[in-house]
Image: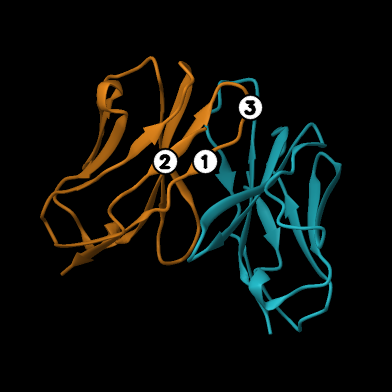
Amino acid sequence: AQKVTQAQTEISVVEKEDVTLDCVYETRDTTYYLFWYKQPPSGELVFLIRRNSFDEQNEISGRYSWNFQKSTSSFNFTITASQVVDSAVYFCALSDDRDDKIIFGKGTRLHILP
Amino acid sequence: DAGVIQSPRHEVTEMGQEVTLRCKPISGHNSLFWYRQTMMRGLELLIYFNNNVPIDDSGMPEDRFSAKMPNASFSTLKIQPSEPRDSAVYFCASSATGVSNYGYTFGSGTRLTVV
């Protein structure tokens, strides 16, 4: 069965610090997709990134970066030089290649303190 | 593109009443998903449709919940009768299948409170 674990329930850091959100996944499939979504205080769910299982290249988008390591079944998300606007709940998610169902982790609530 | 549109944004109802949540997916998307979000259980997939056909409803909590998709541009999630434990935020999402799952676009959600 597929499973996504976000062990960090809540994290608080001071603005401008770097912060890494952990994500560990379980799947028996060789083809799968990993996602990160952001849920700001306003409540909507915003897509951040998708990565397929055959692409282990790390990705950087501005202050955001993602580290995908199949050897440890992890897909971690780092925010560099955090800002107050980064305060949100962040969800890691997993989907296989058989259908479009996405399984979400429980989320990590990130507080960026001014 | 207007995105995924859900209505109403907020719903307060009394226990025992029927509640209907509505969703209009993005035009051209052929998969539609209903999720429920609670503090205790996080984001749970309730049901999803592909080309208007229900594919997997294993997440529907019980017979009080039903979902329909009469056409490609409209879906409803109905709870009858509603109970206080149904209070949650219900999200609808849509995606275009056949493109190796690029992820969903979510609606803004309906916050349901059953008193």
Real-space Cα distance between discs 3 and 1?
11 Å
Assign the N terminus of chain B to one quadrant of the image: top right
The quarter of the picture where residue B20 lies is bottom right
Earlier in the chain: of badge 1 and badge 2, it is: 2
Color used for chain B? cyan
Give the SS element for disc 2. Answer: strand
- What is the three-letter code of the residue carrying label 2? Val
Judged left or right of residue A114, residue A94 is right
Residue lying farthest to the front in this orientation: A1
Query: Which numbered disc, 3 or 2, marks the residue closer to the eye?
Result: 2
Residue to which mark 3 is pinned = A99
Residue beneath label 1, please? A103
Residue type marked 1: Ile
Above or below: residue A68 compared with residue B75: above
Residue at x 61% of width, y 22% of height: A98
Q: Which chain is orange?
A: A
Cβ–Cβ under 8 Å for marks 1 and 2: yes
